[in-house]
Image (cartoon, coloured by chain):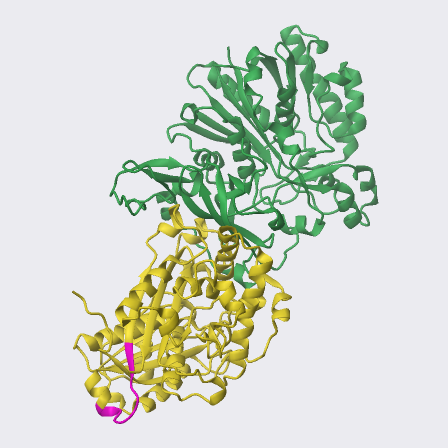
Amino acid sequence: MIGICSYGGYVPRYRLNRSLIFNAMGWMNPANMALARGEKAVANFDEDSITMAVAAGIDSLKGIDRSKVQGVYFASTSMPYKERLNAGIITAALGLNDHIRASDFSGGLKAGTSALLSALEAVESKRTNNMLVCSSDCRLGRPASPQEMIFGDAAAALLVGDEAVIAEFKGSYSITYDFGDHYRGGIAKFDRQWEDRWIRDLGFDQFVPEVVNGLLERYQLKITDFAKIVYPCHYGAARKRLNKLLGIAPEADQSNLQAEIGESGTPQSLVMLVNALEEAKPGEKILVVSFGSGCDALYFEVTEDIDNKKDRDGISGCLSRKADLDNYQKYLVWRDILPGDVGLRAEEDLWTRWSLLWRKRKQVLGLWGSKCKRCGTPQFPAQRICVNPDCGAVDEMEEFCFSDKIGRIASYTGDMLAASYNPPAIYGNIQFEGGGKYMFDLTDCDLDSLAVGMPVAMSFRRKYYDEKRDIVGYFWKAVPMKEVR
Amino acid sequence: MAEGIKDKVAIIGMGCTKFGERWESSAEDLMVEAFVECLEDAGIEKKEIQAAYLGTHFDEVNVGKAALPLAMTLKLPYIPVTRAENYCATATEAFRAACYSVASGAYDIVLALGVEKLKDTGYGGLPGGAAMGTTAFMIGPNRTAPGAFAQLATAYSAKWGIPMDKIKPAMAHISAKSHANGAINPKAHLRRVVTEEQIMAAPMIAYPLGLFDCCGVSDGSAAAIVTTPEIARSLKKNQDIVWVKALQISVSSGEESIYTNWDGAHLVTTRKASQKAYEEAGIKDPREEISMMEVHDCFSITELVTYEDLHISPKGGAIDDIMNGFYDLHGQIPCQVDGGLKCYGHPIGASGLRMLYAMYEQVLERIPEERKVKNARMGMTHNLGGVPHANVASIAIIGRD
């Protein structure tokens, strides 16, 4: 049996209430009033599609031996790098083996399901196993555009394999059209779209039934055989019409989370699928449909093993930890739409020395340190000579990964002098349970809520952006945990 | 068995510029200014100087690397000139090198000069970026000096169970005292009396440090000329001579940064360096024997924990001494009698020598009455370069007798 063996989800902490956007920009496009409901999930200033994919990946690999992962497929239309394998950065951040396959899937919004299909078929070929599919997007609409209201940021991850399968892959059907509903050229920052009526009436209304009926016919199924039908369509009226047309019962219509997250782009169907798996029961059939330059339809059947994977954060876990971003301008600065002045201190030249990064890649991207084989002391960064003054062993270290360790805040501050897009810059000494200590940036938190002794988890984030050379640097930051699980 | 430096070297001359925003002066101007005062005080000619050490820290925004700027600015005639650098202990390192050069018998008369031109950076605080090396920005926190030192306060509060609203007034007292001392010193950078209430109400720089908990970033230079006891006695007949009693440096071994045995609420290096300095100087009870001191008050919280780490205030008990005025100008051990880093200013590469200058002037009683420390026989200086979890601590003790 092949299929999905594990799932993980990620929604960034911040929510921007759509009425806040409308209050700021509605004067320019009053018709957006119709969209000014609910909230959209917004990546923090130090997040992007790579970091969100890593977060979802970490969630999906909970309790799973990472050395068994044989491939990483990353699907996104907002990858930070055009050249430099984005999936390679994710592979390093997740601390996976070097000798695996990794690939980026992009171009259309159905790239998420296409990556999933490729992984499923790769496992089916028996040439590989335990393929991790991560998808995330951080798409931008111009201020006052409908897209600005509609889009939201999120990520999903699915581990595909042939052991302990929780949702068996039963089949698929794909259609591909060069349908320019939304598009971005090679250098575009903002999404552009053609008329809504055309996207709705020709796109969704025709393509979704086409791919769904194609799959139903191929596998001799009825729409009512499915407990959940996952498909993206943020147009409320079109969704109602499609449900009626296809015979999708209200309880089978998996929420597109438009009011909670927004249209997340490439990961949209997978985010909805993860959300569906969180509630799924053995024996249920799930139909997953994507939309963008055509459609993929995938058909899964949930197995008894689903109950062993319910400890994931998933999408609902993230949704329960949200915080309001009560400042639209902050969102604009974070996305570099409004060029806020961070001061001269931010203009220091930060050369990424690629040969240095290569040498330190495990340290920087994977948060690998070392552990002394003689005295057992974990240490970050990795040392040649043991830091324990009573030990001091030379070259008796083994690699030790800190990214999955829980730390405690030993000291902290909120710094208004440091150049930051989210001042104060919060950072502190983090002491890891089991040993090891290092000073990290803290993120996704408020200064007032911190205390010495508070537990933190490590999160992969954007560390710096070198504007001059268009380089995003990544490292790990500490995020306060509500409780230690 | 090493004997230490005690009484092997004498300071025969010192000079120190006015610190501050010296927009009109280049580093070269500042060097000349400190040197001229120093040479005149020593009562020797330039050609008698046999070796020199230059202290500069931020070479990127200052005079550049190496010791050439000192040799070429002062026109030192092809003598050995070496640059010393060790964060905020830079000037003390230049002074230490000069003293050791004399004590070793290699040279008779040696110059140490520190200079820093920080006000050409274009922004407040110390420069970061490339000055921090090629890796720090990739894996280090987005930190500044105030943020690194502010954490002493959060950790101190947690360690001793002292709420921040008890620590804040003690920090305010520290800064108010230094402002009072700086206000009456014409060479100081910041010369305004500031009340504890104003200090507590100032905008936050790095929690819990407000604006007045942070020292000034300044331009300035300071210098010393040291020599052998014999030459000092012949030059300063019937005058008091200032002797070097102890010079110690302690450098973090990496334990505070990445090992787990440090509480973050004290400075390991300061404790070690001061202990060794007291032994070198033959001081049994520093609380009774030290007359006055200049400590590294880059931030008020640094001064607070330093009182404890110098083994003068009891551990966890500095606040009582502070609030009782123990370290005020007319207290038992006046601290920052010239205004300190807080108000005299902090041009990194000059600060250690500036502190020595303050102690030297007091020991020789060349201070106006209003700033004079009573019975100023033994003065101690302390630098802390770097950050609490990775630093260089230096201690110098000088005195009469």
Q: Is residue A403 magenta?
A: no
Query: For the C terminus of chain A, which image quadrant?
Result: top right
Q: Is residue B242 magenta?
A: yes
Residue A8, picture quadrant: top right
For image coordinates 44% across by 80% down, the residue present is: B26
- A482 over B340 or under it: above or below: above
The location of residue A190, given as percent across then percent down, is 65, 44
- B202 over B236 or under it: above or below: above
Q: Nearer the viewer, residue A187 or B99?
A: B99
The stretch of residues the image draws in magenta is: B234-244
- A360 over B293 or under it: above or below: above
Left-right relation of A463 to A364: right
For image coordinates 37% across by 57% down, the residue present is: B268
Q: Colour of chain B?
A: yellow
- A15 over B309 or under it: above or below: above
Left-right relation of A430 to B71: right
Could you say which chain is coloured green in the image?
A
The location of residue A334, given as percent across then percent down, is 62, 49
For image coordinates 76% across by 46% down, the residue present is: A20
Residue B190, picture quadrant: bottom right
Residue A377, picture quadrant: top left
